[in-house]
């Protein structure tokens, strides 16, 4: 055993004891977070504008601080982009995480000196939770890779600015850099396909033990390795034993990834966002991700059916119910207040609080009042593939077809198969049946002949890669939305129908 694997076990035991402490007292630690945030934010421009000095309770907080998205917070961010201090949080940000928004154009999400370490520490702790539970730590002595965007940063008003994955690369401590792949120079390559080939050059002969990245881009990495070597990943990297991922639901990719690897390996799911590191999988045996209640953030939850109401119900952690979909709202030590990050979540456990990400609040199909969400289309696909086990997916997305050339409106599923079902029509009907079982409104619309059963548009090989390339979003942390309420993506994917 190497020094990293030896030292990881006592550190993992310590982190586990601390985690048990805060996760067993959720209300206490969340109130502690709220009190700290209000205290630290009271002398900022935002705190003065919203009467932080008069806030004595969560009830007061809700009266003083409205829920808002980036567009509503933008006037404060623009002051920060001019270099002004003490706007949303004390001082100036350590970084701006640059992301693309659908309505706001480019978003600049502040990362403070207080919040920056939570991004790396939370990722580290997810791995240590795995070490503590399983007793496995040898993988830490091998080479680790994070398939990410470029770590090259620009400056905005003197603040380093870039993609979150690039910023995170700068927070990796020196003791891990010696076994981290790829090299900094390779990581800086902007063209994803060129970068991927260089990553393969650097890793093909390395002792890769942990690979991290969002599943579709990890799959692309594996596919290119197989093309080059003609071997399964387990034969190229015999000691590869842990896959760390986040950003998308793993289920649609699981079968093909494990087939490419050639064996089942352990995986660790994480829930990082530019706004903060929210949760991670703390157990290989329990469902859901552990919500990080002592990580510089105070969380609020709005029932999804109320999200677009003028005065929606806002709940603290102790008020949520199991099995109910909520829009996630955060208040953070980076200065995000009443901030809707756009995700929907559902709790699967309260002891400790574990959740699953069910979709995006604005990513749904409700062209006819059905309000189909990401969780439902992913479950429908999962249940269907279980009945057609020969089927392997690369990627899929769903859009409404409101004005078809003939016949009733319907949902159109754009699917790229790596191995198609033997009977595509039977697969289509089963998929539609499963969605009807999961969404009563969709079922009523089909039963009432307002919609016809869904249509599958099978796409040729590499369609989603080619689509993302055409949008300038190939690689890194970019991903195709699982579903949308318009035809913007669909109209582009029509070009790739096989």
Image (tube, helix red, strand yellow):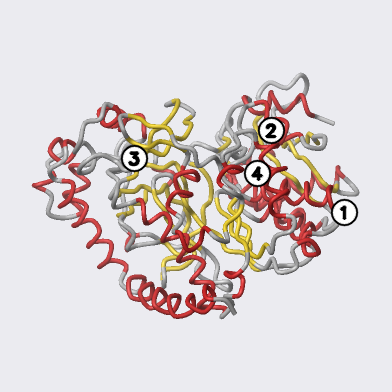
Q: Between tags 4 and 3, which lies in front?
A: 3
Q: Quadrant of the N terminus?
A: bottom right
Return the disc, 3 or 2, that comes first in the chain's sequence: 3
Name the residue furthest top. Answer: 405
Give the alpha-carbon distance from disc 3 to disc 2, as whole Å: 44 Å
In this rendering, would 439 be left or right of 13?
right
Q: Between tags 3 and 1, which lies in front?
A: 1
Give the alpha-carbon distance from disc 2 to disc 1, as whole Å: 46 Å
Q: What secondary structure is marked by label 1?
A: loop
Q: Which residue is mark 1?
A: 230
Q: What secondary structure is marked by label 2?
A: loop
Q: Between tags 2 and 1, which lies in front?
A: 1
Q: Which residue is mark 4?
A: 443
Give the alpha-carbon distance from disc 4 to disc 2, as whole Å: 9 Å
Give the alpha-carbon distance from disc 3 to disc 1, as whole Å: 45 Å
Task: Name the disc covering residue 82, or none.
Answer: none
Asked whether disc 3 touches disc 2, contact meaning CB atoms under 8 Å apart, the reply is no
Q: Which residue is mark 2?
A: 451
Task: Name the disc covering residue 110, or none.
Answer: 3
Q: Visible in this render: residue 80?
A: yes
Residue 50, percent from left and from top: 16, 39
Return the disc, 4 or 3, that comes first in the chain's sequence: 3
Asked whether disc 4 touches disc 2, contact meaning CB atoms under 8 Å apart, the reply is no
Seen from the viewer's position, the closer of residues 370 and 190 is 190
Q: Is residue 164 above or below residue 179?
A: above
Q: What secondary structure is marked by label 4?
A: helix
Q: Quadrant of the C terminus?
A: top right
Residue 414, percent from left and from top: 73, 36
Give the alpha-carbon distance from disc 4 to disc 3, as whole Å: 43 Å
Asked whether disc 2 touches disc 1, contact meaning CB atoms under 8 Å apart, the reply is no
Return the disc, 2 or 1, that comes first in the chain's sequence: 1
């Amino acid at each position: 055993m190497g020094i990293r694997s030896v030292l990881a076990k006592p550190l993992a035991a310590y982190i586990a004891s601390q985690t048990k402490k805060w996760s067993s007292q959720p209300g206490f630690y969340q109130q502690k977070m709220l009190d700290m945030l209000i205290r630290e934010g009271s002398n900022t421009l935002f705190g003065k504008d919203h009467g932080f000095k008069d806030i004595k309770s969560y009830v007061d907080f809700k009266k003083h601080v409205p829920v808002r998205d980036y567009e509503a917070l933008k006037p404060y961010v623009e002051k920060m982009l001019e270099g002004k201090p003490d706007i949303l949080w004390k001082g100036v940000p350590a970084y701006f995480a640059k992301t693309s928004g659908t309505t706001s154009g480019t978003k600049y999400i502040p990362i403070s000196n207080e919040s920056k370490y939570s991004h790396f520490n939370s990722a580290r702790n997810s791995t240590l939770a795995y070490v503590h539970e399983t007793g496995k730590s040898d993988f830490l002595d091998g080479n680790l890779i994070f398939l990410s965007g470029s770590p090259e940063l620009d400056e905005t008003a003197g603040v380093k600015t870039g993609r979150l994955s690039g910023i995170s690369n700068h927070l990796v401590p020196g003791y891990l850099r010696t076994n981290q792949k790829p090299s900094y120079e390779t990581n800086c390559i902007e063209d994803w396909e060129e970068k991927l080939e260089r990553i393969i050059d650097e890793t093909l002969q390395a002792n890769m033990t942990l690979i991290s990245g969002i599943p579709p881009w990890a799959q692309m990495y594996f596919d290119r390795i197989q093309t080059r070597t003609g071997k399964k990943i387990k034969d190229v990297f015999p000691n590869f034993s842990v896959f760390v991922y986040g950003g998308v639901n793993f289920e649609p990719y699981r079968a093909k990834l494990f087939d490419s690897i050639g064996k089942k390996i352990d995986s660790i799911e994480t829930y990082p966002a530019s706004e903060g590191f929210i949760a991670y999988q703390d157990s290989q045996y329990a469902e859901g991700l552990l919500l990080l209640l002592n990580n510089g953030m105070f969380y609020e939850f709005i029932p999804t059916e109320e999200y677009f109401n003028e005065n929606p119900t806002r709940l603290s952690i102790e008020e949520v119910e199991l099995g109910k979909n909520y829009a996630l709202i955060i208040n953070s030590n980076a200065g995000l207040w009443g901030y809707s990050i756009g995700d929907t979540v559902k709790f699967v456990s309260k002891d400790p609080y574990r959740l699953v990400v069910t979709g995006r609040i604005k990513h749904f199909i409700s062209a006819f009042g059905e309000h189909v969400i990401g969780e439902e289309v992913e479950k429908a696909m999962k249940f269907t593939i279980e009945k057609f086990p020969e089927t392997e997916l690369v990627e899929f997305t769903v859009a409404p077809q409101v004005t078809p050339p003939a016949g009733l409106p319907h949902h159109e599923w754009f699917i790229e198969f790596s191995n198609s079902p033997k009977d595509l029509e039977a697969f289509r009907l089963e998929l539609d049946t499963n969605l009807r079982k999961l969404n009563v409104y969709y079922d009523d619309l089909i039963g009432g002949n307002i919609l016809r059963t869904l249509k599958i548009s099978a796409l040729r090989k590499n369609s989603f890669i080619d689509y993302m390339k055409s949008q300038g979003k190939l690689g890194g942390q970019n991903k195709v939305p699982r579903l949308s309420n318009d035809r913007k993506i669909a109209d582009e994917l029509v070009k790739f129908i096989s």
